[in-house]
Structures are given as structure tokens and as C-alpha cells.
């Protein structure tokens, strides 16, 4: 077996990128030859000189940062250079023993690479880290109205609706990209799929080709088991993530202001000034490294995850549960799937301030939150989110597809 992993970046730039690179490194440890094919560099130092791992980077710009905007527009729809380079690479492989595993293509590579792989008879496995396989703006979310979008993707109503976070012209470009991806790139018709949560799978089911294989694999959680954080002795409510409207940190700021809550926002984004205005006592740390976040979480009482959009599998919720930190989550996103309502956390109605206040009020009870903390901690560690299990599952899936 040989594996080619497609990822826009040759370095970790987010959750999906980390999973892609962790997959590559986990596979080579099992003596599987892996090629990581990417568009945007630089190549991370820790990926160099790894046995059984070949890294190809085209040293292109991603769509957002390309100074040549015409080139960015074209490459985002159909990256000709990437397609040609990928075609040359595939000449070195046998399609009967090679899996193409796609983790990211929307920021640089485009569906042009999938198109040539399918044409040459290779089996393509697409990791559904988000909703771009079906939705033009990749989230089933109307960024103008700040609400979930129920329109059928690429329907006439979808095309004429300005749901983009930037402007309608950008939405039109996204529609063209989606049309090309579906009708020329062969996505999602000609590929197999991995979904990462039952929640996201329910959203995507109507758009997948049921004739092809569909697998469930939870993302691995890279975390070391330590003693439970005694949250019942802490007061701080925590938000971790981008401070953007779809993540809804402003709702927490409003609630914290009314309830005089000690609250810390770990992250940054366009909502930062609004949060400061609503609740000047709120702490906003900006982005922090892993060790700094660990130190803050030692003083955490509860994680609040009030997201307004679907998400797919927010890892921050699971990472907090692993420490014994219960979570309050909106019902609208996949984080709700990671919680046992009333046992490891609490769910509240999306964007409902009063409902969130009721949940927070319950978390103020030391005995309730102590029991929840213990349950969350034990429930997490009774399951296996290890990279080892994840890699074993991935190899099983590869074999299933090749057979």
C-alpha cells in the first residue's frame, strides 16, 4: 500500500492541517510509504528527513494571500499548475495499490487534483473536515444574517443570496468554484468519504454519493492524561476560539456582564472591541501557545461554547472534557454530540441569552459542577481518542477501499 495525502499547506495551519500531518506521520511509523502533496510552504522542519515520507510543496500562495488577485481567482477555481504536478506524480504510482487521501484543497490545490486522480483510476478518500464538499461558502451559514442557511446549495435562491462574509461578488466566485468542483472536479460524486461526527454526517448526507463508501472516524486528541482539574474550586468561565460572529463570543460577553462573571476569552478576531465595550472586565488574551492555555485552564470552572454555526467536531470541547472541565454548548453545532447533557455539560438553545444564563447559573453550584467534572473526566478517558487507534482505523479503511 502507498498513500498520497493532499493538503493545501506543508505545515500546520489549523485543526484540519494538523490531522493531515498527524496522519502522514502516523502512517510512516507503520512502514507505509507516504507522500504529502501540498501547494503552500514552507515545509515544516519536523517533516524533513522522515523515513518513508516524501513531501512535495509547489511553493504557491494560498487564495487569500496571493498578491496577484487574478491568479488567486483562477487557482481557487482550478489550479492548473497543481494539476500538472500531481499528474506527473501519479505516473510513479500503481492505482491498484495507492490511496489518495484528501484533507484540504479549498485554499490552494482546488478540485483539479482530484479530477486527474479519478481520471487515472485512483481511489480518492475525502476527509470531511467541514462542509465545502456541498456548500459554496463551506458552512451552511449566512454570514450577513448571522444564521444557519437552509437553502439548497447551487439552487437559484442560493445563487442570488448574499451569504458571504465579504461581499456578493465573492459569493459569485464561490458559486462558480462549487459548480466547477461538482461538474468537472468530480466532488462529491466520484470519491469515498470519512466523516468526523454524526452531527456533520446528518447535514452532509443528502449531498454524498451513497454508491461510494462512507466511514466514520473521530479525530484523534493529542493530550496527555493528568489529574482532574478541581473545577469546583475555580471561578473563571472560559471561551477558546476565534472572536468572530459565527462563534458568538458576544453572547457570552453580554451574559457575563449581566451576571458579573469572571470570564476569559482565549483568541482574537473582529468581535474583540465589541466584547471590551460590552464587558470591560472581560479578559482577552489573544492567541496563546499550548503551555499558556494549559496554565489558564488550571483556573477554569467551565468552558462556554456558544457557536452559532454547525461546526464539525470542535476539538477544544473534548480537550477540556479530558481535563475534567465541563462545557456549556449551544445545541446547533457538533460540540453538542461530545457532551452528555446534564452529566458532562449542559446544552442551551442557540443564541438564547436566558437559556445560557440558566445553564451558567447551574454551573455555579459547587456540588453539581464537581460531579459533572468527575463524570466528564472519566467518560473521556474511558474512550480511546488516541492517534494509534485513529491510524489503525485509517489503515483499515484504506484496505477496505482498495479491496
Image (tube, rainbow, N blue to C red):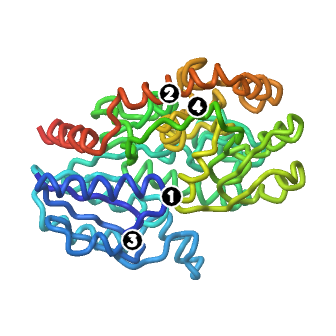
Callout 2 touching callout 1 (CB < 8 Å): no
Query: Where does label 1 land, which residue?
Result: 290
Please state if 352 lies on the left or on the right of 148 as rendered: right
The CA distance from mark 2 to mark 1 is 21 Å
The nearer-to-camera label among 3 and 2 is 2
Callout 4 touching callout 2 (CB < 8 Å): yes
Q: Find residue 371 and report its horizontal and vertical position in percent.
A: 56, 20
**Secondary structure found at label 2:** helix
The nearer-to-camera label among 3 and 4 is 4
**Secondary structure found at label 1:** helix
Q: Find residue 386 and report its horizontal and vertical position in percent.
A: 31, 41
The nearer-to-camera label among 1 and 3 is 1
Query: Where does label 3 land, which residue?
Result: 39
Task: Give residue 376's mark.
Answer: 2
Give the quarter of the image for residue 151. top right
Q: Quadrant of the C terminus?
A: top left
**Secondary structure found at label 4:** loop
Identify which residue, 90 or 368, lies in the foreground.
Answer: 368
Please state if 213 lies on the left or on the right of 286 as rendered: left
Identify which residue, 53 or 74, lies in the foreground.
Answer: 53
Q: Looking at the image, which residue is at 77% across and 40% down? A: 252
Amino acid at each position: 500500500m502507498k498513500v498520497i495525502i493532499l493538503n493545501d499547506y506543508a505545515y500546520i495551519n489549523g485543526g484540519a492541517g494538523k490531522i493531515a500531518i498527524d496522519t502522514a506521520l502516523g502512517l510512516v511509523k507503520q512502514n507505509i510509504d507516504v507522500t504529502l502533496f501540498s501547494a503552500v510552504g514552507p515545509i515544516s522542519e519536523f517533516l524533513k528527513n522522515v523515513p518513508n515520507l516524501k513531501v512535495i510543496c509547489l511553493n504557491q500562495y494560498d487564495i487569500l494571500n496571493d498578491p496577484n488577485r487574478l491568479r488567486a481567482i483562477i487557482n481557487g477555481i482550478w489550479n492548473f499548475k497543481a494539476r500538472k504536478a500531481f499528474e506527473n506524480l501519479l505516473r510513479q504510482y500503481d492505482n491498484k495499490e495507492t490511496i489518495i487521501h484528501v484533507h484540504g484543497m479549498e485554499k490552494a490545490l482546488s478540485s483539479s487534483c482530484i479530477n486527474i486522480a479519478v481520471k487515472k483510476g485512483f481511489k480518492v478518500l475525502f476527509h470531511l473536515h467541514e462542509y465545502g464538499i456541498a456548500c459554496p461558502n463551506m458552512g451552511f451559514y449566512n454570514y450577513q444574517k448571522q444564521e444557519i442557511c437552509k437553502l439548497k446549495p447551487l439552487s437559484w435562491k442560493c445563487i442570488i443570496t448574499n451569504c458571504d462574509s465579504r461581499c456578493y461578488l465573492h459569493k459569485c466566485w464561490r458559486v462558480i468554484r462549487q459548480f466547477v468542483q461538482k461538474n468537472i472536479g468530480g466532488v462529491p460524486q466520484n470519491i469515498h468519504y470519512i466523516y468526523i461526527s454524526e452531527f456533520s454526517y446528518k447535514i452532509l448526507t443528502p449531498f454524498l454519493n451513497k454508491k461510494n463508501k462512507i466511514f466514520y472516524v473521530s479525530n484523534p486528541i493529542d493530550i496527555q492524561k493528568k489529574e482532574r482539574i478541581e473545577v469546583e474550586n475555580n471561578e473563571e468561565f472560559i471561551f477558546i476560539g476565534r472572536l468572530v460572529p459565527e462563534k458568538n463570543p458576544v453572547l457570552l460577553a453580554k451574559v457575563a456582564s449581566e451576571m458579573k462573571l469572571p470570564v476569559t476569552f482565549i483568541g482574537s478576531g473582529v468581535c474583540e472591541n465589541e466584547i471590551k465595550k460590552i464587558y470591560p472586565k472581560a479578559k482577552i488574551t489573544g492567541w496563546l501557545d499550548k503551555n499558556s492555555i494549559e496554565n489558564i485552564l488550571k483556573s477554569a470552572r467551565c468552558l462556554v461554547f456558544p457557536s452559532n454555526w454547525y461546526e464539525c467536531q470542535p476539538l477544544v470541547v473534548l480537550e477540556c472534557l479530558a481535563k475534567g472541565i465541563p462545557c456549556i454548548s449551544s445545541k446547533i453545532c457538533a460540540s453538542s454530540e461530545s457532551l452528555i447533557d446534564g452529566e458532562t455539560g449542559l446544552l442551551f438553545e442557540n443564541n438564547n441569552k436566558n437559556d445560557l444564563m440558566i445553564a451558567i447559573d447551574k454551573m455555579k453550584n459547587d456540588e453539581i459542577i464537581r460531579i459533572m467534572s468527575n463524570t466528564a473526566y472519566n467518560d473521556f478517558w474511558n474512550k480511546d481518542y488516541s492517534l494509534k487507534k485513529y491510524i489503525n482505523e485509517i489503515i483499515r479503511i484504506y484496505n477496505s477501499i482498495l479491496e
